Amino acid sequence: MRPHKHVTLLCASAAVAIGAAALAPSAAFAHGFVGDDSGDPTHTLTARVAMQANGDMGGAQYDPQSLEAPKGFPAAGPADGHLASAGHTEWSVLDEQGEDRWQKNVVEQGDVTVNWTYTAPHKTSQWRYYMTKDGWDPNDALDRDDLELIETVEHDGSEASNNPSHEITIPSDREGYHVIYAVWDVADTANAFYNVIDVDVQPGDGETPEPVEDTEAPGLVPDAAGRAVSSTEAEITWGAASDDRGVARYQVVRLGATEGDFQVVKEVSATGRSARLTGLQPGEVYSFGVRAVDAAGNVGLAHTILTVRMPEQAAAPAAPKHLHDMGTTESTVALMWTAGDDTEGVRYEVFRDGDKVGETGATDFVDVGLRAGSRHEYTVRAVNLDGIASAMSNRHVTTTKGDAASEYPTWDAHAAYTKGDRVTHGGSVYEAVQSYQGHGDPNWITAPSLWKPVS
């Protein structure tokens, strides 16, 4: 990535930038979009779907982070004429194309900054940025032949939040209305995210603008606080810091015994307001601070020292033993186990297939609402009055009565599914891990991020 170059971004409408806080509740499969929640339209580019001045977009404006489709663009991905909606028919209004149809980000030729807002940062392989060619027809449907690649940002497969800002260069031969097509390739699923960004390119001098020196550090981070949430974990929270050109990220630092001795223990994107710190020592006292960093690398002063005292580790209760079932029906499993030696004030948490499904003060539990013929693995753990959990019990696998295959529909690569839905495919039963809309890819049933086999 090239060093940051400051370019002023003007806006064709005063209300172009919206952030996650201004959106209606999003779907369970939300992930990310181009834009931020700074409220400053001169700070970053804003995607068509996230530009509030565009008005009603078939509900997509309330869910801008879900423009997801199979990756592999331009060989694969959304079809021509449906690039803006990523092939989501319910949001096809985004595919309407006209010179005066959409509000535009006004930019100059040269380098501009692209920020993503992540609601569920996936592991990432790369971002790519395409732009309409000189001489394209803005009143014709947007398709692949209109676009050429102008920037690729490689990534190492870690979560996308490690790289919240990119620099892309607007070529010197672009002027007037153009479209930038941002493609975020996910590393651990078969999908990518697609955002159209409408821009009005102002002529420059034919050269990339010279960097404008930024020497002003961000201000003090307000409202910072810290607390222990267990004997080994702490939570640090803070408010938004100010900067003349915008905060790029926040750093949580651990302060040492001597002045100037500190260690950065967590970095959070500009939209983050909290961090969970793990691996701390019970009974220890820690000093933390939070500081803001801008895009030029200027570092603000850390907040007044936050002292967090970790509680002493209480002894964990003994793990339950001999977990077994007392019988099953087509929709229930009756579980029973033997308590450990220390039972005073102990409650038990019951897990099915790794997910907690209930808790009880007794040593038996009936799991209800199951599907006929479904196979499940159960474990139980004890939790004492201090909230300290035991190790897990033995694993017990059992199957409800009935024929599973007859209970579920056959998986359809084009259908929409909700988390928890079950289908049959290839003689096995699968359960949806998250909600999504299918687009015909026959491989999605084997993607661990979408489906898990249950029998």
Image (cartoon, rainbow, N blue to C red):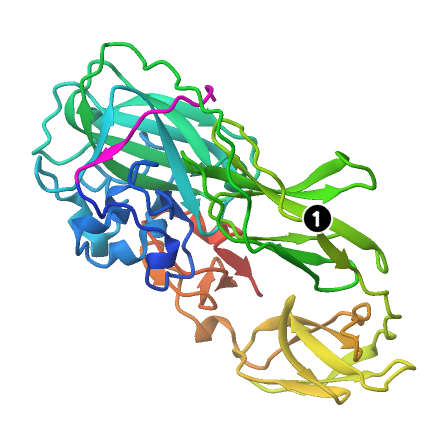
In terms of depth relative to the viewer, which is nearer, 29 or 171?
171
Give the total of numbered labels.
1
Q: Say which residue label 1 marks.
A: 288
Secondary structure of the residue carrying tag 1 is strand
Residue 351 lies in magenta, yes or no? no
Instruction: Indicate the quadrant containing the C terminus: top left, top right, bottom left or bottom right.
Output: bottom right
Q: Considering the whole magenta stretch, tell me its main secondary structure.
A: loop
The amino acid beneath tag 1 is Phe
In terms of depth relative to the viewer, which is nearer, 113 or 190?
113
Residue 187 appears in the picture as rendered: no
The quarter of the displayed image where residue 314 is located? bottom right
Q: Is residue 70 rendered to the left or right of residue 267?
A: left
In terms of depth relative to the viewer, which is nearer, 427 or 197?
197
Q: Residues within 10 Å of mark 1 (few under 14, many from 20)?
A: many
Coordinates of residue 37 in the picture (x, y in percent)? 38, 48
Q: Residue at x 79, y 77 (%)?
A: 382
Coordinates of residue 272 in the picture (x, y in percent)? 51, 49
Q: Residue at x 16, y 18 (%)?
A: 134
Q: Is residue 85 rendered to the left or right of residue 338?
A: left
The quarter of the displayed image where residue 207 is located? top left
Coordinates of residue 158 in the picture (x, y in percent)? 57, 38
Q: Is residue 75 rendered to the left or right of residue 393?
A: left
Find the residue positioned furthest to the top. Answer: 206
Q: Residue at x 50, y 37 (%)?
A: 218
Coordinates of residue 167 in the picture (x, y in percent)? 40, 25
Residue 8 lies in magenta, yes or no? yes
Q: Residue at x 46, y 53 (%)?
A: 445
Image: magenta residue range: 1-12
Looking at the image, is 301 positioned above or below residue 237?
above
